[in-house]
Image (spheres, grey):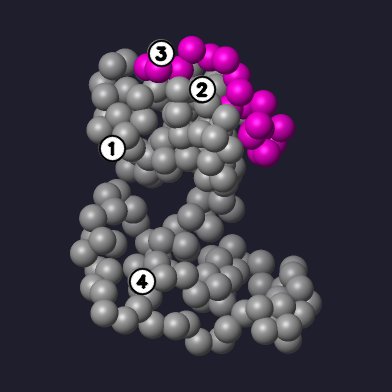
């Protein structure tokens, strides 16, 4: 039980032992109604060492990382990096993920980041569409964004920085 809390603290800098379950994180969470657990319930499950429930929950995948929970927490606990850490552990342990499309997006996002060092929306969209085999569902939306100049065909380059060391430091992620 303490092992997971220690690892979370070491990896994310968030001390979940400080949480006294006030519920402010959950009451402000924009995706709480779409998930199986609230943010405060995820914290409590982690405090109790119930990692199987956490790693197989939809909440860690639905979390957008908006950091509303951290802004509302009286103890300055920000759950966004904790949710990311839980995603990483779930992937490492090859846990069955309830939100397959979100996992696919997550993997596609990381692959695009590894390839270019930054996000290129068209590459992300194309990779995601090819992986999900859902090629045409929102084609008109994408065309409209392209025509308004919101999507660039070619990515911009990262200059003067070697991002590969940073990317290599990400543990447990497979493209």
Q: Quadrant of the N terminus?
A: top left
Q: Is residue 76 visible?
A: yes
The residue that label 2 is drawn on is 74
The residue that label 3 is drawn on is 48
Q: CA distance from mark 2 to mark 1?
A: 21 Å
Q: Earlier in the sequence, mark 4 or mark 1?
A: 1
Q: CA distance from mark 4 to mark 3?
A: 38 Å
Relative vertical location of residue 81 with respect to residue 134 in this rendering, above or below: above
- Identify which residue is drawn at 26% across, 74% down: 161
- Residue 168 left/right relative to 63: left
Q: Earlier in the sequence, mark 2 or mark 1?
A: 1
Q: Nearer the viewer, mark 1 or mark 3?
A: 1
Q: CA distance from mark 4 to mark 2?
A: 35 Å
Q: Earlier in the sequence, mark 3 or mark 2?
A: 3
- Mark 2 secondary-structure assignment: loop
Q: Circles 4 and 2: CB distance less than 8 Å?
A: no
Q: Which residues are magenta?
A: 17-35
The residue that label 4 is drawn on is 117
């Amino acid at each position: 039980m303490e092992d997971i809390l220690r690892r979370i603290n070491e990896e994310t800098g968030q001390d979940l032992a400080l949480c006294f379950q006030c519920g402010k994180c959950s009451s402000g969470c924009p995706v709480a109604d779409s998930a199986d657990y609230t943010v405060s319930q995820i914290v409590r499950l982690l405090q109790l060492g119930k990692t199987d429930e956490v790693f197989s929950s939809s909440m860690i995948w639905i979390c957008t990382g908006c950091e509303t929970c951290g802004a509302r927490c009286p103890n300055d606990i920000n759950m966004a990096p904790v949710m990311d850490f839980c995603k990483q552990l779930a992937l490492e342990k090859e846990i069955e993920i309830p939100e397959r499309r979100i996992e696919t997006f997550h993997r596609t996002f990381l692959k695009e980041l590894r390839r270019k060092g930054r996000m290129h929306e068209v590459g992300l969209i194309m990779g995601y569409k090819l992986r999900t085999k859902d090629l045409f569902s929102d084609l008109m939306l994408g065309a409209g964004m392209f025509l308004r100049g919101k999507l660039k065909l070619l990515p911009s380059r990262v200059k003067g920085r070697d991002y590969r060391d940073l990317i290599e430091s990400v543990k447990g992620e497979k493209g």
